[in-house]
Amino acid sequence: MRHGQPKLAATDKMSALEMKDWIEQYDSSDITKHPVPEASKRLAATAKVIVSSNLPRALTSVQALGLKPALVDGLFREAPLPYGHWRLPRLSPFVWAFILRILWLWGYSHGVESVGTAKRRASTAAQRLQCLASEGPVLLLGHGFMNRMIARQLEADGWARQTGNGSQYWGAIVYQNDSI
């Protein structure tokens, strides 16, 4: 499950260099007080094991669901965004986030975890979730991009996608492996 909507102050257009501060603010943000969707609450209630990223937006999402995580680990944190040293152009931080994510996928990591390292981390995260699944259904409160990377590894390991409602805030996808 992806975390709830982060609490971010409205921001003006900025340079790629200014994105460094925006990314830091995003990584330290809690979630808004918007109500948790009922479908997310119902799904979360079926889990026996609760796992969370160590970023505040994931942890406050677990709290909003009224749950306590059995495991909190940076292994599940979002794949990082790099920032640039360019002062122009000035764009919305959301446009920059899209551009910087594409650049990151193409190999531009500028001092943050590389794509290859993030893929290895996602593989390790998938293995950890698979081990925890022997205890019963697992709920991971994580992040959009890393959740997709973990999902790819689960599928490669024979897990099948059962249901899903997308990767928006509070979106979740359920995977199952009949061999467990």
Image (tube, rainbow, N blue to C red):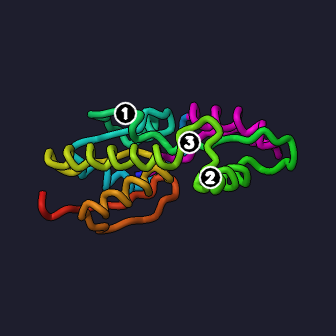
Which residue corresponds to mark 3? 80
CB-based contact (under 8 Å), mark 2 and mark 1: no
Decide: is 177 above or below 113.
Answer: below
Which residue corresponds to mark 1? 73
Q: In the figure, is residue 170 to the left or right of 103? A: left
Secondary structure under tag 3 reads loop
CB-based contact (under 8 Å), mark 2 and mark 3: no
Q: In the figure, is residue 4 to the left or right of 154? A: right
Amino acid type assigned to the residue bearing label 2 in the image: Arg
Residue 169 at x, y = what percent?
51, 53
| Residues rendered magenta in the picture | 2-29
Pair 2/1: label in front: 2
**Which residue is painted at 19% across and 62% down in the image?**
177
Residue 11 at x, y = what percent?
77, 42
Closer to the camera in the image, 4 or 157: 157
Residue 8 at x, y = what percent?
66, 39
Amino acid type assigned to the residue bearing label 1 in the image: Asp
Closer to the camera in the image, 42 or 109: 109
Mark 2 to mark 3 CA distance (whole Å): 9 Å
Which residue corresponds to mark 2? 101
Closer to the camera in the image, 90 or 5: 90
Q: In the figure, is residue 125 to the left or right of 103? A: left
